[in-house]
Amino acid sequence: MLKSIQIGIVAAVALAVSPAGAAPAAATPGLVVEQGQFLLDGKPFHIVSGEMHYLRIPREYWHARLKMAKAMGLNAVTAYVFWNVHERSPGHYDFAGQNDVAAFVRAAQDEGLYVILRPGPYVCAEWEFGGFPAWLLKDRTTVVRSRDPKYLEPAMRWLHRLGRELEPLQFAHGGPIIAVQVENEYGSFDSDRAYMEDVRRTLVAAGFDRSLLYTADGGDQVAKGSLPDLPTAINFGTGEAQKEFAKLRELRPHGPFLSGEYWDGWFDHWGEPHNTSDAKQEAAEIGWMLGQGYSLSLYMFHGGTSFGWMNGANWDGKRYQPDVTSYDYDVGLDESGRPTPKYFAFRDAIAKATGVAPPAVPSMPPPQTIGAVALPESASLWDNLPAPVVSRDVKTMEDLDQAYGYILYRTTLAGGGGKLALDGLHDYARVYVDGVLAGTLDRRLGQSSLAIETHRGSVLDILVENTGRINFGKQLRGERKGITGSVSLRGVRLEGWKIYPLPLDGVADYRYADKSCAAAPCFYRGRFEAARSGDAAADTFLDTAGWNKGFVWLNGRALGRHWNIGPQRTLYVPGVWLKPQGNEVIVLDLTGVERANVTLRDKPVLDVAPPSLSPH
């Protein structure tokens, strides 16, 4: 008879971290594996979980979203933890307000749900840099997701600090955390088992030894990313359940059998079509998995929004593919937390397979239409530049301790025009000569050079946007932002730069005037009132039709990006972020607009047809 895998985990790690001669730790109550089956507190248990992320949902809505999870028939939620938001600068941690992950875990317990924790330190998640803080890249020799001490030491320090927040919330201590994932899909990245052991040992030392540790990978990557004495989950998408579980059964014939991510939807890239998937097929697969006695976690149950600058990006081997702000994902709950047809199809499938009648589905107030909002005030970026950093060579954002936003490079030219080449453009640039736009360059399209006309003494400005760091694959190791190499004109390297970091943290304090903006890029500001129902205003969606490319802020919050290449056109505005009067919206448009207004409407637009991706 197989012994509990959990006992093996604790015993193996105890030998590594306990003083010589100390007795191995005893088995703890909670989720364990015996005879290839999950047991919770000694009783058979099937995990029926769904992923949702605390940073993609306004804190005020956590309980409402968790109630919806319970009402769909879930008994657990799965959640990543995002290192970059909690440690924005080395050694300074933030777990307050929206970042209070422990409060999210407690909210799940309040709603009768267990928690499967995925602390990373790498999380993927279509999140900026896979959840890594940008300051890891300041030293160009640092190799993330490796045993390089310049990465491993701060990563291990982070996990220890996270343990102080969440270790007390494990099931053994009366909390809801029943399982903790070791790293994340590492087999899709590399095969360094020693590194995986480092992460496992650190999680144990941080106090997570009282939960079931496990790994998760695609079926074909399990051998590279798993640890032999830990359970492994497999991740796959629509239509792949039978094939992928067959792979897991061949690799781990004794079980347990868990889909750590069942991709019941997908995310969107700027300039590409909006993704949807087949609800009927997914409901049938959910029913099949549960009918086989398998466990699963839906990725996602509720996607939410990658507010602010937090969208990630992909690399398909040839092209950079930045993600949109919306993380709607076409799943059970839409971006604003409202149930979709998938929600009810999945709810029926789960109830039929488990024989458990779920609670009633909570009602939600509908979103509101506020209408057109004029933005009569404007400010030019050129009139609001900070003090520059003077440098012989161009520097990246990370060199200047900047993580997100834009960066401006300025130099005075000594001669005539020609081919301007940017070595290492990350990610989108607007090139100006003597204040006039000469052209744009887009990493998505493989563009890195253009011809410019200049004369002796011309001022060259290159405004570069960080459109989101890659979050998957080894390409992420080189995701410094700005210009990562050099700038040359007619093959001659340009030197003597003034560099302006533009994180855009204080755009409300810029010098606005009640007149048209004379020189783009421009910031436009306006105010509006919001109707209220009860104690809070209803949600709405800010429509950016008629705008070009830029960013939106609402009441001081960084809402997200807009770009007329689609597919996303509206930005989700949570009602709890609105005030009865004096709501302030600021829109940055890199090109500028003649009529500065936005429309607040009651429905999202996430499926605008994108233009061709052909380079030009």
Image (cartoon, rainbow, N blue to C red):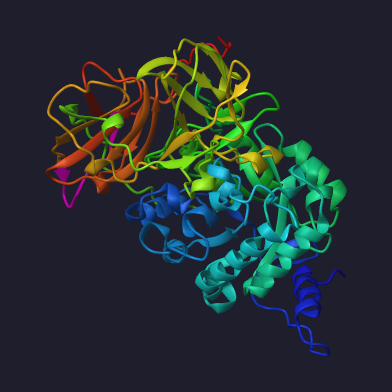
354 is higher (above) or lower (below) than 561: below
The percent position of residue 552, horizontal first and vertical second, equals 32, 34
Residue at 47 percent of width and 54 percent of height = 85
Residue at 54 percent of width and 61 percent of height = 115
Quadrant of the rendered image containing residue 21: bottom right
Furthest toward the bottom, the residue is: 21
The percent position of residue 205, horizontal first and vertical second, equals 67, 74
Q: Which residues are magenta?
A: 532-542
Looking at the picture, tell me which residue is in the foreground, 509 or 433: 433
60 is higher (above) or lower (below) than 447: below
| Type of secondary structure dominating the magenta stretch | strand
**Residue 363 showing in the rendered view:** yes
Image position of 388 (left or right of 136): left
Whether residue 253 appears in magenta in the rendering, the answer is no
Looking at the picture, tell me which residue is in the foreground, 154 or 385: 385
Placement of the C terminus among the 4 image quadrants? top right
467 is higher (above) or lower (below) than 616: below
The percent position of residue 7, horizontal first and vertical second, equals 77, 74
Image position of 32 (left or right of 355): right
Image position of 240 (left or right of 343): right
